[in-house]
Image (cartoon, rainbow, N blue to C red):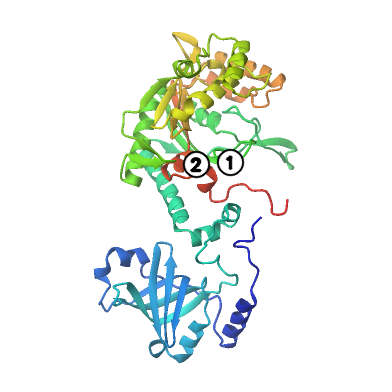
Amino acid sequence: MSKEGLDSHSPSTRSTVDNLQQKSLELYSGPFPQSCLVEEIVRQPEDFVGKETVVKMAGRIMALRRHGKATFADLQDRSGRIQIYLKQDKVGEEAYQAFQQLDVGDLVGVEGRVFRTRTQELTVAADHFVLLAKCQRPLPEKWHGLKDVEVRYRKRYLDLIMNPLVMETFLIRARIIKEMRDFLDQRGFVEVETPMMQTIPGGALARPFKTFHNALGMDLYLRIAPELFLKKLIVGGMERVYEINRNFRNEGISVRHNPEFTMLELYQAYGNYQTMMELCQDMVSSVLRKVKGTFKIKYRGSEIDFTPPWKQLNLREAIWEKGKIDILDDSIEGFKKKSRELGISFEEDWDRGKFVNEFLEKLVQPFLINPTFVLEYPVDISPLAKAKPEDPRLAERFELFMGGEEIGNAYSELNDPLEQRKRFEQQFQKRQEGDIEAHLIDEDYIEALEYGMPPTGGLGIGIDRLIMVVTDAPSIREVILFPLLRPVNV
């Protein structure tokens, strides 16, 4: 791994610390109440320039330019950067000499008035300063910055300090989640929390993480989805619920996958997958417009237009068009033959569902740039979805794609306990045959359905992937503050 950003304490830094301590300057002081942020001055400079208003600002020194008895520095707070200016005859010789001992990376507080230099740069002329925290390791070198990807993810705090666009990405992430909450709250949805440790992993076809509870002497699983618990709340009469939740799936790591990820999952009683399609379109387009100010964004060199209404595509027809494969009527042997012709890898024990998912991912998904609802998946890969009355081989289900990425999944929820038991038994049989991602039989959930669950629409949206598209990020790890990495030297 590169040593970039991981330098040990330098001799010069140690010397500086000793000098400051000899001058009786406290290295870690505070608090320091701020009267304003950089962005407030930049946004409305007329409220500050030439006024008698004294501003109190705090942040990290990002550059120093010393000129004898005057020093310029760049101060960075959470909102941006501004120049500060210290003169020896203003702050006093002792204080000025102490400031001369400071380094790039140190955190300081300053008090002063705002003016413009001869080059019209907004600047705070400091009357006083205080060292708030000494930076004892050198920041990454100024001109080359912090670019090693592994170091950026492992030392995200340095990434946030050195790369303004990274900070912007995570501020956008926070804004998107807030706007989603506001959208749902305004429509009568209730935000809830459901267990992250479960006795039976359910709600999705995925491999769980397993742990052990010492006091109870029992195995537990980190949740792969909150679905079954949220639908129990629908049974209980909450009618509109959502959770912005952490899910855990014991799968590979790629530009699209992180074992720990964030989902928005919601359920609405007396609706169906069509209800969810309308809600999904309204919510995502509304959030995008509020956060980005437009319906059009760039992702991986392509323009994505979120202007409603969004395209709808039939899964069976789309795969037939791209590969001349009938996902309902062709045999497994036919799937294998066609896969070989198309150069699609597969495993000999794959069932119909795994082939369908692979055909979708390889043949159709790369072409779904504008937001597109792909509808009507086979029931055998939709064990919790209601079947279409006119063709019980198909589920009332859609997935949402944009920028060639799968972003969401929704369906009319299966609320018939007898049919649900039958589906669980079919899944359990697959598990017995070696499919470790298949569902177990959840008797508690079936019992809840026996008390009566109203017709319900459910929707899940991958928050990380959505933000990846909105911010034009090349990898899901760019939008997760601390993605999973191997330990150093392993």
Q: Residue at x 60, y 21 (%)?
A: 354
Instruction: Confirm whether residue 398 shows in the render.
Output: yes
**348 left or right of 92?**
right
Q: Which mark is residue 464?
A: 2
- Mark 2 belongs to which amino acid? Asp
In percent of width and height, residue 96 lies at: 46, 86
Whichever of labels 1 and 2 marks the residue nearer the N terminus, that label is 1
Q: Residue at x 43, y 66 (%)?
A: 77
Q: Which mark is residue 258?
A: 1
Q: Residue at x 47, y 19 (%)?
A: 322
In percent of width and height, residue 308 lies at: 31, 31
Note whether 215 is above or below 270 in the view shown: below
Note whether 287 is above or below 357 in the view shown: below
Q: Residue at x 46, y 51 (%)?
A: 170
Q: Nearer the viewer, residue 373 or 53?
A: 373
Note whether 45 is above or below 250 in the view shown: below
Q: Secondary structure at mark 2?
A: helix
Q: Which mark is residue 31?
A: none
In percent of width and height, residue 258 lies at: 58, 41
- Mark 1 belongs to which amino acid? Asn
User: Would you say the residues marked 1 and 2 are in contact, meaning their CB atoms lie under 8 Å apart?
Assistant: yes
Q: Nearer the viewer, residue 10 or 232?
A: 10
